[in-house]
Structure formats: C-alpha cells, structure tokens
Image: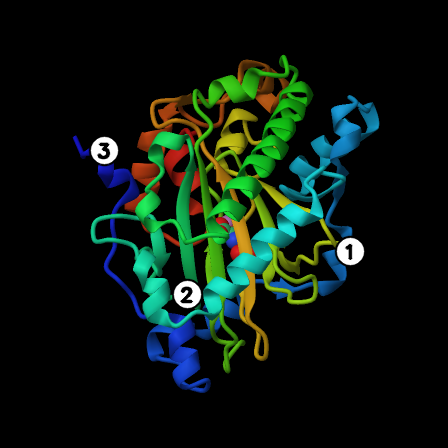
Amino acid sequence: MESKSAIYAPVPALPNVQEMVRNDPFQVPEKYIRNETDLINDAVLSPHLSSEVPTIDLSLLLKGHEEELDKLDQACKEWGFFQVVNHGVATEVTKGLKDAAEKFFELPLEEKDRIAIPPNDIQGYGHTQVDHKVLDWSDKLVLLVYPHQYRKLDVWPPTPFKEAIETYSSEVRRVAEDLLRSLSVIMGMKKSALLELHQELVQPLSVAYYPQCSMPDKVLGLSAHSDKGSLAIVMQQEDDVMGLQIKHDGQWVPVKPPHNAFVVNVGDIVEIWSNGRYKSIEHRVVTNESKARISYSTFFLPHQNAEIEPLDQMVFQSLGSLPLYKKVTYGEYLRETKRMKSEGKTHVIEVAMLES
Ligand code: OGA
Ligand code: NI
C-alpha cells in the first residue's frame, strides 16, 4: 500500500520562470522547448470556433429553466467546456482577487518565496511539475482552500491577498455547488445527488503566472491535460490576454471568455459518472510573446474514499446499456493516473475504462 501522501506526491523545486524572464527575456532553456510533433502536428488551431464555445446563464439554471438545462446538457456533451455568465459573483470580489494577485507577483522573488512550497509538500508558491519531460512556462500559488482542515496557513499569502482568496473561494464554491445541482437534475437525479457523491467537496485553488515568452511557438504555459476532479472553474486576469485552448473535434480552440464570465470544464469524474456522455476535454495554455497572463483555477474534487463509477441511469441511457468505466475510489484514481505520467487525456481511457 502506498501512503496517503503519495497521492499528492511532493516534487523537487524547479526554477522560477518569472525570475528567469526578468533576468533575461530572451533566454529559453532547452528543457522548456517542445518538439514539432508535440505542437504542430498535434492538431490544427481553429480560432474561428472560439465564438462557438457555449455560454450558460447561471441565473436561469437556478430558476430551473428547461431550455438552459438543455443547453448545459449539450455543452457538457459536445464541448465539455462552457462559459458561465450571471454567476452572481460581485465584480468587487473578482477584482479584489485580481488586484491582490497582480501585486503579489510583482514582489521580488525573496518576498514571494516566504510562502514557497515546503519540501515534501504541494501547497505554496513555486513550480511543481514532474509528470512531463518538457517543463511548463509558469509559476503557481497552489492552496487547498476547502475543507478548512486542509489549509496550510503558513503558505497563504499576506493581507489583502489572503482575504481576497477566502472571499473569492467561498463565492466560486457556491457557483460550483449550483452547477453540480443542475448537473444532478440533467442526469435524472435529485439536486443534491452529485454533491453527496463527493462525500466532501475538496477545493484547491491554483493561481498561475504565465510570463511572456520569446518563443511562444515552441513553449507551452501548461501542457495538454484533462482535469481529474469533477469540475474546474477558471477566471482570467484580463479579457484580452488569451492563452487557454481546448480540444474540440480534434482542433485547438482558443477560449476568449466574455467580460466577467468564468470558464467551466467537466473533469474526469463527471465523465465517469455520466458514463461518457459528458466529456472531460483536453486543454492547454499557450504562451504570449509580449504579455504575461494570470489565471485562477479552482478545482472541485471528491473525497479520496469516495467510490466513483458510472451512475445507473446514465448507463441505462447509453448505447448497449453497459458501463464503460470501472469502479475506483478517487484516491486510487489519482494514484493510478499519477503512475501513468502520460501527457494528455490518456489516463481516463487507460485507467478507468473497462476492457471491452
Ligand atoms: C489547469 C488549467 C487553465 C488556465 O490549471 O488545470 O487548465 O487558463 N488552467 O490557466
Ligand atoms: Ni486544466
């Protein structure tokens, strides 16, 4: 048996990318450079599809609006990604977080390193990537915000960033809970069903700083991956700095969220629960030659002991009425996917899929 901590395995410290760029904006070490097959032959870029990413109005979902629930079903089925508007999170809250984060990243490295990820941990500021051979062009502040008992306050940033994280996280949790209630309804269950299946709604926050990069065609801010939880909610600093791309019908589609919208995506666990009706889509972040980008990703995950398997009514609905994924605890799922260390979305298929 692996120890509990192996699920969130610690990683060695990597260079601070923002500092590298500060010292020499034109230097790009070899270990960040991708080969052509990785980037170009992978899939074509289709910017014209950006405007087709579905938009969901949360205020309509809350009223049980049938058409909006249908839109949510289609969005999760066809795209695995959507933008949420009328989410009810006040601009002061989002702006409060953005202002505080921007100031934090401007600090000298020594100041930021006061909350550096301690050895053998995953929470804090730094760069914690080991799964991919080629490194990502970013630094992150990662904190487990909920449940409260997981918080490591030693690595929380100082006031007012700390308070801004607290306020934003509680608001975005409400948005996720509302979305999970609507998803329960479109999956034919009582509203509270998916929240109950989580046992506990675990909520990490990742604030990512993607510095500008002199070789944007060869360097990624974040490698292609799918998210391993149930849902992820992403907010970005400025509307005009694009970076996030999602894979849709074999093409990379840049996401340009409308002002004041969140980008939401379905994670692997919702794909399993829905027996593949809803797709956990591969996505990545590209770098920008002239501007840095800051994003705020909140992930929603079940408790480690929660058993994850396709839901009966979703199996009955699917072709052949057969489950496509085996039953796993969430902890096992994380351990297995970590072991695969493979890029992209292969893990759902290889780890959870039943052999046919
Ligand atoms: C992630 C992610 C997107 C972004 O952290 O899993 O997909 O825009 N982030 O930073
Ligand atoms: Ni992601």
Instruction: Tell me where residue 159 appears, x and y as whole percent.
Output: 46, 52
Instruction: Tell me where residue 328 appears, x and y as whole percent.
Output: 36, 25
The residue shown at (45%, 27%) is: 325
- Label at residue 136: 2
Q: Can you see residue 94?
A: yes
Pick the residue in front: 194 or 310: 194
SS at badge 3 = helix
Pick the residue in front: 134 or 119: 119
Task: Please identify, in this view, whether the residue under mark 1 or under mark 3 is nearer the observer.
Answer: 3
Q: Tag 2: residue type?
A: Asp
CA distance for labels 1 and 3: 43 Å
Q: Tag 3: residue type?
A: Lys
Which of the image's four quarters has the N terminus? top left
**Where does label 3 land, which residue?**
4
Examine the rendered structure and indicate whether residue 226 appears above or below residue 101. above
Pick the residue in front: 207 or 273: 207
Instruction: Tell me where residue 206 appears, x and y as whole percent.
Output: 46, 50
The residue shown at (60%, 31%) is: 174
**Where does label 1 land, which residue?**
51
Residue count near mark 1 (Cα–Cα under 10 Å), binned few <14, some 14–19, many ≥20: some
